[in-house]
């Protein structure tokens, strides 16, 4: 079972859309997938379920069916995590969701206090710090997941630190702009610091009764999103930022010296470059299904069906690239976009 977090310090880069579609494509290709919404904005959850279903995740105002409900006993000081059933997604029974919750932010202060105390082998602090990892592991085991994809918010706070120690690998979505480049400069050193600090805490607590995640956070590569194309080439306004992505990623995320003037298309660290699919996004939200699975009955007509097929090819490519880099065997290729 592989665990992949999608993370960038810069918001608005299509991160949640990427998680949603890669999760759906993994399921389309035959794997059992658990998508985990650890962004307190719960955007991944809102993409997967409609408003009535969302309300059903909070029976009688309680949040027992979400990630918040799973950790509520720790927040209340009454116990440890409790099991949450993965939420099956209607368009593919192999895709399950661990729902997010706006209330997750209440856990931030507890996580910030717990982090330094883990060094002192305080079991309550270790219980808090590993809560997300243990909930995810338990849920993925019951779902019999082959792969876990985690969506996290665009910040470098304690909540995301606890989320990232769950991940073996990290994919960085970014847009070709100045702010994404600055996000890379912040992200790389922070990931390395979190990894070093967690390894120290983990080694000190290996004898604890709790499961302690490895927290490898290995950078797997980046995905350039929201390209503006003209004649199959990025427009001039984006080129100046595109040209800086390979060296910035290599220097700040991988902590390696720049090895020359590599373009994005030639860069081995690039997993994919994805276009903006414009009108397909709103149709997909209305239908509560991936853009690549839209049909004429969902309102995708004429030229839009060509865009659906192109979208399928793009997400098939990025998903298989991720699978190949992680040694994941894809059992089925069953193209649904006709």
Image (cartoon, rainbow, N blue to C red):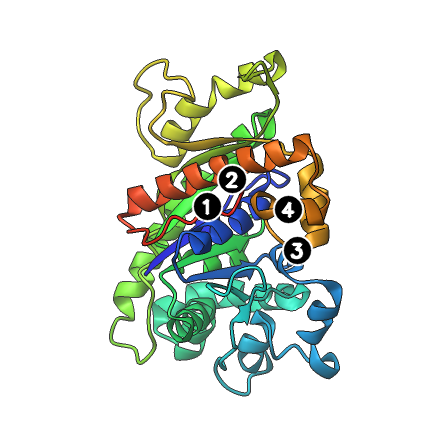
The residue singled out by tag 4 in the image is 295
Q: Is residue 326 left or right of residue 57?
A: left
Q: Tell me residue 141's x, y (percent).
A: 37, 73
Out of 253 and 123, give the one closest to the viewer.
253
- Rendered view: 284 above or below 40: above
How many angstroms separate mark 4 from mark 2 (CA)?
A: 12 Å
The residue singled out by tag 3 in the image is 288
- Rendered view: 26 above or below 254: below
Q: Nearer the viewer, mark 4 or mark 3?
A: 4
Quarter of the figure that contains the C terminus: top right
Q: Residues within 10 Å of mark 2 (few under 14, many from 20)?
A: many
Mark 1 falls on what kind of element?
loop
Mark drawn on residue 335: 1
Q: Is residue 335 left or right of residue 67?
A: left
Query: Do callouts 1 and 2 mark residues in contact (Cβ within 8 Å)?
Result: yes
Q: Looking at the image, tell me whether mark 1 or mark 3 is earlier in sequence order.
A: 3
- The image quadrant that residue 99 belongs to is bottom right
How many angstroms separate mark 4 from mark 1 (CA)?
A: 13 Å
Q: Is residue 328 left or right of residue 7?
A: left
Q: Tell me residue 85's x, y (percent).
A: 52, 77
- The image quadrant that residue 259 belongs to is top left
Q: Nearer the viewer, mark 4 or mark 2?
A: 4
Q: Tell me residue 270's x, y (percent).
A: 40, 30
Mark drawn on residue 312: 2
């Amino acid at each position: 079972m592989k665990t992949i977090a999608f993370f960038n310090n810069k918001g608005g880069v299509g991160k949640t859309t990427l998680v949603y579609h890669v999760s759906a494509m993994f399921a389309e290709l035959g794997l059992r997938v658990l998508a985990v919404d650890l962004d307190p904005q719960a955007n991944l959850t809102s993409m997967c379920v409609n408003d009535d279903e969302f309300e059903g995740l909070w029976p009688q105002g309680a949040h027992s069916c979400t990630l918040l409900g799973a950790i509520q006993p720790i927040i209340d000081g009454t116990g440890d995590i409790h099991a949450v059933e993965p939420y099956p997604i209607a368009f593919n029974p192999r895709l399950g969701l661990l729902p997010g919750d706006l209330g997750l932010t209440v856990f931030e202060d507890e996580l910030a206090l717990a982090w330094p105390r883990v060094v002192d082998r305080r079991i309550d602090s270790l219980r808090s710090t590993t809560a997300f990892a243990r909930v995810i592991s338990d849920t993925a085991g019951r779902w019999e997941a082959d792969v876990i994809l985690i969506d996290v918010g665009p910040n470098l706070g304690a909540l995301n630190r606890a989320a990232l120690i769950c991940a073996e690998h990290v994919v960085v979505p970014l847009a070709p702009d100045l702010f994404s480049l600055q996000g890379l400069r912040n992200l790389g050193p922070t990931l390395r610091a979190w990894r070093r600090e967690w390894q120290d805490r983990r080694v000190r607590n290996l004898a604890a009764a709790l499961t302690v995640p490895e927290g490898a956070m290995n950078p797997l590569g980046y995905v350039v999103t929201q390209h503006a194309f003209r004649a199959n080439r990025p427009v001039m306004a984006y080129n100046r930022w595109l040209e800086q992505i390979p060296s910035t990623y290599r220097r700040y995320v991988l902590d390696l010296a720049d090895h020359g003037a590599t373009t994005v298309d030639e860069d081995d660290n690039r997993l994919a470059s994805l276009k903006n699919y414009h009108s397909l996004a709103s149709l997909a939200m209305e239908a509560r299904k991936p853009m690549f699975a839209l049909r004429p009955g969902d309102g995708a007509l004429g030229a839009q069906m060509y865009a659906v097929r192109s979208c399928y090819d793009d997400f098939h490519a990025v998903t298989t690239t991720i699978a190949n880099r992680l040694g994941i065997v894809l059992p089925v290729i069953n193209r649904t976009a006709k």
